[in-house]
Amino acid sequence: MSRNGPLALAYHALFVIFMLAPIVVVCWVAFTPEGFLSFPTTRWSLRWFAALARYPEFISAFWTSLGLGALSSALAVAISVPAALAIARYRFRGREAMTTLFMSPLMIPNVVLGIAFLRFFTEVGLGGTFVGLVLAHIVIVLPFALRLTLASAIGLDRALDHAALSLGATEAVVLKRITLPLILPGLVSGWALAFINSFDEVTMTVFIAGPGTETLPVRMFLYIQDNIDPLVTSVSACVIAVTVLALVALDRAYGLERLLVGRRDDGR
Amino acid sequence: MKLQPAYLLTLPALSFFALVVIVPLGMTLALSFHDWGPYKGIVPVFILKNWREVFGDSYYGEMFARTFRIAALVTLLAALFGAPEAYILNRMRSPWRGFFLLVILGPLLISVVARTLGWALLFGGNAGLVNKALISAGLISAPLPFMFTETGMVVALVHVLMPYMVLSVWAALQRLDPQIENAAVALGAGPITVLRRIVLPQAMPGILSGGIIVFALAASAFATPAIIGGRRLKVASTLAYDEFLNTLNWPLGAVIAVLLLAALVTIVVVANKLVERRYAQAFQ
């Protein structure tokens, strides 16, 4: 394969600068010692990170986001596992339609889902509650959980099940001792990808979060609508740091290429 | 008897989706036909008032036109700049390729609010960094307005959605056999000919499917237009947000949401069919 020429590398450098510039700027401004937005700043201070401690709404929003992401991702994985096993193992009527349905939250605009959930939760008395947020987040992260669960379920060697069954294991034992351990890496990665997506979701959540159940991105969004100051950049810098750490861990554990592109062996 | 376990296994997910996705969407459709008044609130009757208002008032037409104009422009720019980058990435050697893939795709997972905040800082009025850079590069003589303009929205959205385009083109290029390029060179083709006759046709399915994703996400984007456009420049999703959470005219907001969903689903399904028909062989 031929190598990239100098022109291609210059283009590549500009492209990378474009992709990173806004992220770098946010982190840079977060370290300003001034009381206003000053960029570029050459002096450094942690005062805006320290100031975060005086804004309990950001701290509690962070915990809400964390709990919401962990819980909704776990529940999404839990209902993905049986569905993934069914789709991977059986050819049945409605299989394609079901897969399309479970992947549909990727295609329905989050703003439309937000509106639909706002209406639905208000009617059934879950408006602005944490339970409502969890239900809504399960919907939007399920496609991610299912995709990775499905990828590992398809890779399973059914001969192992048959061997265990012929040696006298019951279906339940096969599931617990053979199937689940084998698809565990897919479940963990699916959970992590689902968690990141839940942790960052703002469009849908902004419709259904109430006072006390605002997530961190929603809190940041509402804050930015009123004013942009160094405080919100330091919050953003923390969010970016958490995501980058999760990203690097995921890349080490699973490979970001595989995670985002997915393997192409979906049984067709 | 292979049928029953399959249905039993999909039952939890299926019943969950029926209750928490299909019912709310149906309720939203019904809501769009309800009556509403500032004092009487939502009245559950069946009338076409809201639909007439949206189709009769040119304000809504303009707003939908703006939404889809921005989405089309974002898609075009993402394809124009993202496809070459995917090609360059694909030609990189092992450690670098993985590293830059992480750098370029990583932002996808970083909060869209944080990324848009970065653009708001970079645009920041006439003294913003982008304007300073463009002026010192001699590209413009006077500062361009970015905040509260369509230009600013387009730039920020191109950045936010670029990873999807690079990912899609890169996935298509993965299937490209480098030996074909070498064969073309050996047969006397110049670099331009190789790009035009060998690489581009094979990258095209990736560019088109990436374009569909970018278009759909740009047309329904919310946080970026809301932050860059402020309260002045509205697109479909920010207008629907206003109707629901500020004006409280839910039925009218529901009409906008239903229209946005219907338009997007139609465009995406038709575009997918066209791409699949055009590239029927490539997908087999």
Image (tube, coloured by chain):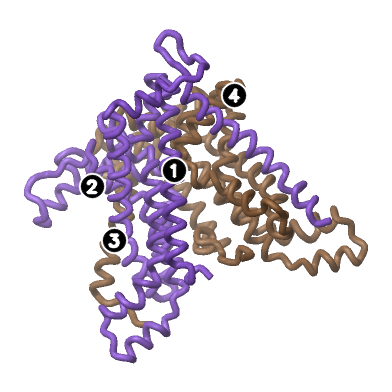
Q: On the same chain: label 1 and label 2?
A: yes
Query: In this rendering, which labeled residue sits more in front, label 1 or label 2?
Result: 1
Amino acid carrying label 2: it is Thr
**Depth order, front residue of A173/A162:** A162
Q: Chain of mark 1?
A: A
Amino acid carrying label 3: it is Leu
| Element class at badge 2 | loop
**Depth order, front residue of A191/B14:** B14
- Report which residue position mark 3 lands on: B80
Relative horizontal placement of residue A48, taking residue A86 as reference (left or right) = left
Q: Chain of mark 4?
A: A
Spot occupied by residue A160 in the image (x, y as percentages of width and height) = 80, 67
Quadrant of the frame with the C terminus of chain A: bottom right
Spot occupied by residue A251 in the image (x, y as percentages of width and height) = 52, 60
Quadrant of the frame with the N terminus of chain A: bottom left
Find the distance from the CA under tag 3 to the CA under tag 4: 45 Å
Amino acid carrying label 1: it is Val
- Report which residue position mark 4 lands on: A126
**Depth order, front residue of B282/A138:** B282
- Report which residue position mark 1 lands on: A239
Instruction: Give the mark, 1 or 2, whose residue is nearer the N terminus.
Output: 2
Residue occupying the far top of the picture: B39
- Report which residue position mark 2 lands on: A42
Instruction: Give the mark, 4 or 1, whose residue is nearer the N terminus.
Output: 4
Amino acid carrying label 4: it is Leu
Q: Chain of mark 2?
A: A
Q: Name the colour assigned to chain A in the rendering.
A: brown
Find the distance from the CA under tag 4 to the CA under tag 2: 49 Å
Instruction: Give the mark, 4 or 2, whose residue is nearer the N terminus.
Output: 2
Relative horizontal placement of residue B62, taking residue A255 as reference (left or right) = left
Find the distance from the CA under tag 1 to the CA under tag 2: 23 Å
